[in-house]
Image (tube, rainbow, N blue to C red):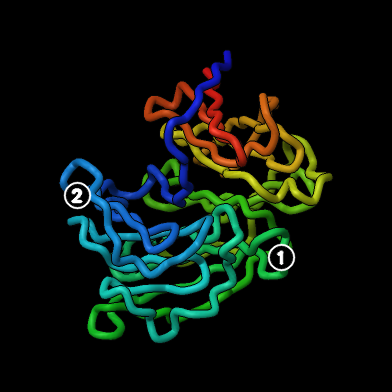
Amino acid sequence: MMRSFILLAGLFLFTITQSIAQREANIWYFGANAGLDFNSGVPVPLTNGQVNTAEGCSAISDSAGNLLFYTDGLWVYNRNHTSMPNGFGLLGSNTSNQSALIIRQPGSFTTYYIFTVDGGNGPGGLCYSVVDMTAQGGLGDVTSKNVNLYTPTTEKLAAVKHANGLDFWILSHESTTNNFQVYLLTAAGVNTTPVISSVGTAFTNFADFNGALKVSPSHTKVGMAVWGSDYAELFDFNPGTGVLSNPITLPSITTWPYGLAFSPSGQRLYISTEGSNELSQWD
């Protein structure tokens, strides 16, 4: 069942996952030097951010909610809001829907992975870079940069915990097929052999690369907005194997579905559209 709503305020997209510890996601930086701090229980505006981007970005804090670093997929800024010495030239894009995603390496409190996707089926593809928070006196630095997993990819990127509660799945989608490529991040690093699920509608429109990819709070559903062809898809996801299955197509009520998110219960899926204030709710 679908309902339509008129939004009174604009929506912004920020790459975040229910899979990380609650306070690690308490500080956001996004947009034109904007930010929000949720540590008090209510959002407090921040104006000291260094990113200036219209689309994807990511930030990470420690378990107490203290900012560690943030990125727009191109630059990496430490907690003092200065670029890490090697924190430049990442292969995300300021035109990529989900340009960057930060995940702490399982079993470590000092090593973090930044996954990036280029914009518009660009040559950068899906890459990862590694941040060592013991470097630079605890301010951190990028120690490995732009390790390519495959190219070309779409702008769709998400992460979710493995069924074992320790490891992470990194979800992405190829640019001209119906293939999802899903990579496993463990304490040993990234397994570069992906789980490939050929499921759903194959992308035939160049602009299908755009639109969000999100995982439900239960870790068992995946939603995907397909901007170029005006629809969204819903899939079952197996957090033990990384396999997607059972696609359901959700037609958009207007053009250019872009943002997408599940409700906290996972019983509702919300889809926003570019260029309008309309939000669709699917039950």
Q: Quadrant of the N terminus?
A: top right
Q: Residue at x 58, y 53 (%)?
A: 97
Residue 91 x %, y %: 59, 71
Local SS, label 1? loop
Residue 186 occupies which quadrant of the picture?
bottom left
* Residue kind at label 1, given as amino acid type: Gly
Q: Is residue 199 left or right of residue 95?
A: right
Residue 93 occupies which quadrant of the picture?
bottom right
**Residue that protrudes farthest toward the top in the picture:** 1
The vertical placement of 98 against 225, above or below, is below
Front-most of residues 122 and 6: 6
Question: Which label number is shown at residue 122?
Answer: 1
Res. 250 in view = no
Residue 126 x %, y %: 62, 63
* Residue kind at label 2, given as amino acid type: Asn
Q: Residue at x 38, y 70 (%)?
A: 50
The vertical placement of 15 against 253, above or below, is below
Front-most of residues 255 and 78: 255
Q: Is residue 42 left or right of residue 149?
A: left
Question: Which label number is shown at residue 39?
Answer: 2
Q: Residue at x 63, y 54 (%)?
A: 155
Residue 257 occupies which quadrant of the picture?
top right
Q: Label 2 vs label 1: CA separation?
A: 37 Å
Q: Residues within 10 Å of mark 1 (few under 14, many from 20)?
A: some
The vertical placement of 280 against 223, above or below, is above
Q: Residues within 10 Å of mark 2 (few under 14, many from 20)?
A: some
Front-most of residues 272 and 131: 272
The vertical placement of 250 against 112, above or below, is above
Q: Is residue 91 left or right of residue 5?
A: right
Residue 193 x %, y %: 64, 60
Local SS, label 2? loop
Q: Residue at x 52, y 49 (%)?
A: 158
